[in-house]
Amino acid sequence: MYRILKGELKNSSKFKNKLLEYTKTLKQVIHNKYDLDFDDEEITELLLSACRSNDFNVIYQYGNKMFLNEEKVLGWIEEKLLPNIVIAKLDDADVLRLLIFCIEITYQMFSGGTKATVSQKGFRDRRRTFEAILADQFVGKLGEIFVKKYLEETYNVNIMLDWDISSQIDSHRNDIRNARKKISIKSSPTLAGIWAEADIGYEYGIAVKCSVPQQPILQFFIEVCGFTRLLDFAEDKIPSSNGLFMNYLSEMRERIRKYKCGEIQTNLKGFICGYFNTSEHEPVKKGEQLPYLGEVREERYLIPINKLKWTKDDWKEFLRNVSLL
């Protein structure tokens, strides 16, 4: 029996250390029963999110103490987490479209071809680098691909994503173009987060958690041989007598040795947390403080993930309401 302290919910390192052996057991159970692999960070952060929001009632209270309900955790994994996991490889056609889209829109942002800002949202005076924007764009839109795959494969519907790059900032662009209602799909690389969000003006919000490599764009080039070719080019140009850089190149080759040229190994995981109808909620005002989030920087809808709709019947209702089913 694991007692959970409030300080451990606030500190992911403390939570991870407390439940290290338990999460290893969960990983093995998932691997043996479902042939699906999670790394330590993924399963720990997802479990932390469930505990923070008490999703699926994984936490039970005894007096003023909190304990992990291990039976509920297994129910959460089997009934909610795993059925809503979507996996895509780097060579998936939609993921490749995403890479090209992100490179192009980022170039256009820096060249003035689109009105989107290169300043960080919420910190308008902080100008982001090309690489930072590219990575943000990739993770931000990856959730849309996961939602598309999930809905098409589960409900036999056609989902059209918005791949257009506009020279104007269009407010409330529909993330599912062929839906009759305004839908916002928000992706988060923070697996431990507990808030789903949508800007004011949208009728539905969908939350997706994305597990991607720390450097997703670099991983593309490693696995399609682009990085190896760069090393070959550098090795040809830098004199072999330059021992320091020959050593750097050797270390880089060793780091990517397990990747065979052109063999795609990396899987991207998406957890479809669920959706909400904005008409059923009130926006959260700017300046309010929310648990595990802090200060709200602009007024918008913020819904705890344990309040989202996620069952198969819920999704069927959603698809009917937006005229996709």
Image: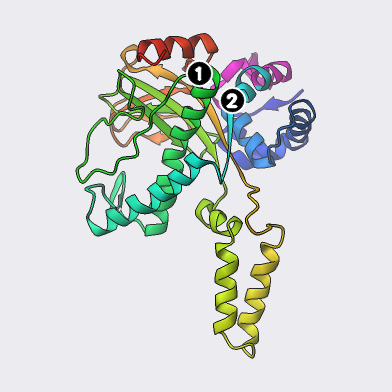
Task: Please identify the quadrant where the C terminus is shown.
Answer: top left
Kindly indicate the quadrant of the structure image that contains residue 50.
Answer: top right
The residue drawn where x is 80% and y is 29% is 32
- State the residue position of label 2: 50
Q: Which of 55 and 131 is in front in this view?
A: 131
Query: Which residue is situated farthest in the left direction here?
Result: 168
In contact (CB < 8 Å): disc 2 and disc 1: no
In reply to whether residue 56 is colored magenta, the answer given is: yes
The label shown at residue 156 is 1
Residue sitting at x 63%, y 75%: 248
Q: Which residue appears farthest toward the bottom when viewing the image?
A: 241
Q: Estimate the spatial distance between the alpha carbons at disc 2 and disc 1, rounded to whole Å.
A: 29 Å
User: Is residue 292 placed above or below 263 in the rendered structure?
Assistant: above
Q: Give the camera-side residue of 103 and 301.
A: 103
Q: Is 32 left, or right, of 120 in this rendering?
A: right
State which mark lies toward you, 2 or 1: 1
In magenta, the rendered stretch is 51-76
Residue 64 x/y as whole percent = 62, 17
Asked whether residue 194 appears in the rendered view, the answer is no
In the image, residue 142 sits, relative to residue 216, either above or below, namely above
Residue 124 placement (x, y as % from top left): 27, 50
